[in-house]
Image (cartoon, grey):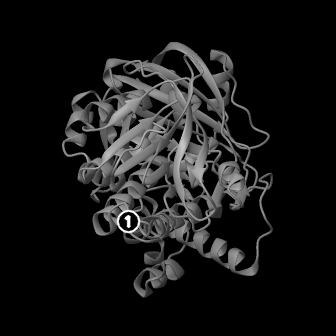
């Protein structure tokens, strides 16, 4: 027999996107159930999140969005060992156009290991029933309205129907929503862009004198320099170091090979830092799925959020921030419309808007690499790529352009801000001057030479 619950929101997936969606629904007093296929084990990585051992960051816009859903989140996360990294003053970023200047700007990112972030969220999200080791099998309803889902326990194999006023798919990039909706006679359209990203990640314990050293990001350089790396501070005084390679570049998982790959990046700073730190544990590999943007049909009672809607090249660090913006869209839609038949349409449109800039930024970069599998570029795409190059070159020289680009990258301002007349004039008038040496302070330089 089906379980009938009034004012019920059913969230499929208990990761970051699912927990935030649950918080959005619970904030309005609805009964909220979260179905998660894994078993939570404190702050340990989950099997269902293979990317969970790799570098993660939450941009300022995402932190603010989560704080509006889960008050006290930032303080709890920082108190548990996460780091607040000012942007661009506390991170050394080597773009295809040179090193970005460092200055106070007000943007920031929060860096920590993914399991810690999920653990803090689980502790703070209240009034939600979480059912672990249970997976969604299919949706209930028809092509006009979803009325719930069939779920199955991974412990005893028992299946049951759970009826709900609104079903939220937060199952990530592996979402089966296209198949589930197909069984109800509706189709999902998608666009795929696949740069063939591969990761290798390790934890390092830096020498004491390097504990306050800035974070580092060495970006790949199109069209053929498809490898990059990041060094980010995480809990317990450690660094998480992720080396990435686009198709044709595979970072090794042995210590010597890992260091050798770091030495082959477009700048040797990451390798220099590894030489001042001790490897902690093993090196983990990960092959990211292709980037995919899904467009869902108008079906009442069903919405998707987070990576179930769009997943991107992880190099750009947008995934969790967009999931937070999706949850805010869900909260606002439910606040205005309740869990009635019209809420799904409103939320779906808002989620699409929240996704658009992050997708455009990621794809605009990915298609510039010669080995990326992607739809053909049209003339407007090529013009946009030309202008993006001019913006990047100007940002390496001009702080105003750098600030505008950073605001757009962190999703704090719309991408259209880069087309404002004042920014366009700066971009077109600034002469490129590639900064080949990182903007280190004198003290930081001395650290690397002693």
The quadrant of the picture occupied by the C terminus is top left
Q: Is residue 383 in view from this perspective? A: yes
Expressed as whole percent of the image width and height from the top left, the position of residue 330 reads 38, 59
Expressed as whole percent of the image width and height from the top left, the position of residue 22 reads 36, 45
Q: Nearer the viewer, residue 22 or 430?
A: 22
Expressed as whole percent of the image width and height from the top left, the position of residue 70 reads 25, 45
Q: Which residue bears the numbered disc 1?
A: 403
Count all numbered tags in the image, as a single digit. 1
Expressed as whole percent of the image width and height from the top left, the position of residue 251 reads 69, 30
| Quarter of the image where one finds residue 252 | top right
239 vs 211, left or right, is right
Q: Farthest front residue? A: 1
Q: Nearer the viewer, residue 345 or 161?
A: 161
Q: Is residue 89 in view from this perspective? A: no
| Quarter of the image where one finds residue 76 | top left
At horizontal 49% and vertical 34% (from top left) the residue drawn is 55
Q: Residues within 10 Å of mark 1 (few under 14, many from 20)?
A: many
In the figure, 121 relative to 207: above or below?
below
In the figure, 127 relative to 192: above or below?
above
Q: Nearer the viewer, residue 349 or 61?
A: 349
| Quarter of the image where one finds residue 171 | top right
Q: Farthest bottom residue? A: 421
369 vs 363, left or right, is right
At horizontal 25% and vertical 54% (from top left) the residue drawn is 28
In the figure, 237 relative to 328: above or below?
above
Mark 1 lies on a secondary structure that is: helix
At horizontal 33% and vertical 40% (from top left) the residue drawn is 442
Q: Nearer the viewer, residue 141 or 198?
A: 141
């Amino acid at each position: 027999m089906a379980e009938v619950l009034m004012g019920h929101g059913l969230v499929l997936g208990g990761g970051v996107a699912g927990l935030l969606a649950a918080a959005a629904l619970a904030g309005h007093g609805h009964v909220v159930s979260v179905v998660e296929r894994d078993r939570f084990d404190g702050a340990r990585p989950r099997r269902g999140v293979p990317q969970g051992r790799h570098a993660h960051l939450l941009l300022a816009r995402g932190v603010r969005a989560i704080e509006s859903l889960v008050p006290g989140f930032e303080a709890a996360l920082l108190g548990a060992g996460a780091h607040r990294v000012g942007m661009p003053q506390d991170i050394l970023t080597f773009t295809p156009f040179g090193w970005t200047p460092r200055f106070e700007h007000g943007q920031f990112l929060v860096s920590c290991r993914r399991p810690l972030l999920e653990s803090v969220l689980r502790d703070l999200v209240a009034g939600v029933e979480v059912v672990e080791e249970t997976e969604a099998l299919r949706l209930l309803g028809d092509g006009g309205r979803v009325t719930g889902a069939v779920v199955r326990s991974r412990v005893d194999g028992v299946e049951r129907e759970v009826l709900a006023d609104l079903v939220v798919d937060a199952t990530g990039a592996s979402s089966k929503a296209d198949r589930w909706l197909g069984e109800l006679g509706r189709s999902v359209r998608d666009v795929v862009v696949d740069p063939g990203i591969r990761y290798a990640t390790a934890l390092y314990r830096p020498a004491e004198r390097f504990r306050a050293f800035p974070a580092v990001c060495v970006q790949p350089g199109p069209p053929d320099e498809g490898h990059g790396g990041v060094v980010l501070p995480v809990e317990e005084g450690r660094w998480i170091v992720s080396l990435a390679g686009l198709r044709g570049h595979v970072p090794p998982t042995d210590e010597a090979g890992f260091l050798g790959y770091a030495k082959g990046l477009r700048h040797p700073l990451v390798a220099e830092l590894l030489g001042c730190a001790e490897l902690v544990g093993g090196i983990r590999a990960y092959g990211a799925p292709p980037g995919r943007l899904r467009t869902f049909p108008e079906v009442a009672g069903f919405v998707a959020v987070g990576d179930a809607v769009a997943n991107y090249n992880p190099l750009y660090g947008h995934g969790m921030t967009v999931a937070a913006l999706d949850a805010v869209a869900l909260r606002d839609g439910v606040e205005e419309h309740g869990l009635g038949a019209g809420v799904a349409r409103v939320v779906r449109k808002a989620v699409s808007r929240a996704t658009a800039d992050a997708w455009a930024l990621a794809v605009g970069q990915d298609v510039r690499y010669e080995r990326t599998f992607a739809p053909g570029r049209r003339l407007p795409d090529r013009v946009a790529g030309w202008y993006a190059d001019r913006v990047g070159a100007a940002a390496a020289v001009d702080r105003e352009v750098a600030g505008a680009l950073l605001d757009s990258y962190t999703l704090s301002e719309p991408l259209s801000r880069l087309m404002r007349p004042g920014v366009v004039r700066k971009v077109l008038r600034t002469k490129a001057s590639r900064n080949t040496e990182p903007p280190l302070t004198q003290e930081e330089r001395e650290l690397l030479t002693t």
